[in-house]
Amino acid sequence: GQQVMQIPQYQHVQEGEDFTTYCNSSTTLSNIQWYKQRPGGHPVFLIQLVKSGEVKKQKRLTFQFGEAKKNSSLHITATQTTDVGTYFCAGKPSNTGKLIFGQGTTLQVKP
Amino acid sequence: NAGVTQTPKFRVLKTGQSMTLLCAQDMNHEYMYWYRQDPGMGLRLIHYSVGEGTTAKGEVPDGYNVSRLKKQNFLLGLESAAPSQTSVYFCASNKQGATEAFFGQGTRLTVV
């Protein structure tokens, strides 16, 4: 079936280090979305990418959508303790109403 | 706006009992989803709906049923609860098309 794989599952970094999580889909996606879930909370939307090869930035966060619209990445520059949480990618396979999430990457930041 | 509201927030069931989780959204969204979240498994789609009166299976539909009789409500039913259904359940909704999804606060269900 349609799958969205995300790596790594966990990442521990020292505050100030960079962080990247990768997302790969087995099928072409109409778009990719990224969400952040704080411990004990619910997922909150960060951004959506739609175009092939698209790159978007939000302050220290950089999001990319692959040329084939099957993969994506989220890069955080100079992590802060406020970046702690689980980051999920989510994709809607073309011609479906499903919104499929990756397994998530849990980020821990040591001060 | 309340956004997406889930009830109840917590529940403990005995094996074999039934229950219904309610999700209500006040944003006039067409699409609604039920996910379960387990450690290391991410958010897995149980069932979803693209409009009033329509539902479809997601990745892990077995043991669950859903109904969307009204546009604003999406109900998730467990007919005979099993310990494997112990999880945190999230409801989400979004507008038709590829737009951001809004999540409820979650329901923590324990089946003993």
Image (cartoon, coloured by chain):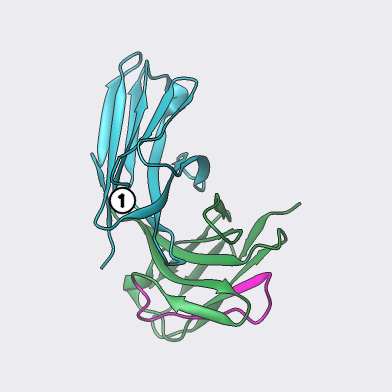
Query: Does A50 appear above or below B67?
Result: above
Tag 1, which chain? A
Left or right: B76 in relation to A91: right
Left or right: A41 in relation to A17: right
Where is residue B29? Give x, y as percent.
65, 62
Query: Does A67 appear above or below A28?
Result: above
Which of these two is toward me, B106 or B56?
Answer: B56
| Mark 1 element type | loop
Q: In percent of the image, x 41 and y 36: which residue is there?
A: A85
Question: Main structural element of the magenta stretch: helix, strand or loop?
Answer: loop
| The image quarter in which residue A19 lies | top left
Disc 1 marks which amino acid?
Answer: Gln
Residue marked by disc 1: A103
The hue in which chain B appears in the rendered picture of the protein: green
Where is residue A107? Give x, y as percent.
34, 32
Which of these two is toward me, A66 or B72?
Answer: A66
Report the chain shown in cyan: A
Q: Check residue B63 for magenta coloring.
A: yes
Which of these two is toward me, A81 or A21?
Answer: A21
Q: Residues within 10 Å of mark 1 (few under 14, many from 20)?
A: many
Query: Does A73 appear above or below A30?
Result: above
Q: In percent of the image, x 37 and y 71: which residue is there?
A: B85
Q: For the magenta stretch, what is the residue range? A: B60-74
Which of these two is toward me, A101 or B106?
Answer: A101
Where is residue A100? Give x, y as percent.
38, 58
Q: In percent of the image, x 72 and y 61: which residue is there?
A: B26
Query: Does B75 appear above or below B33?
Result: below
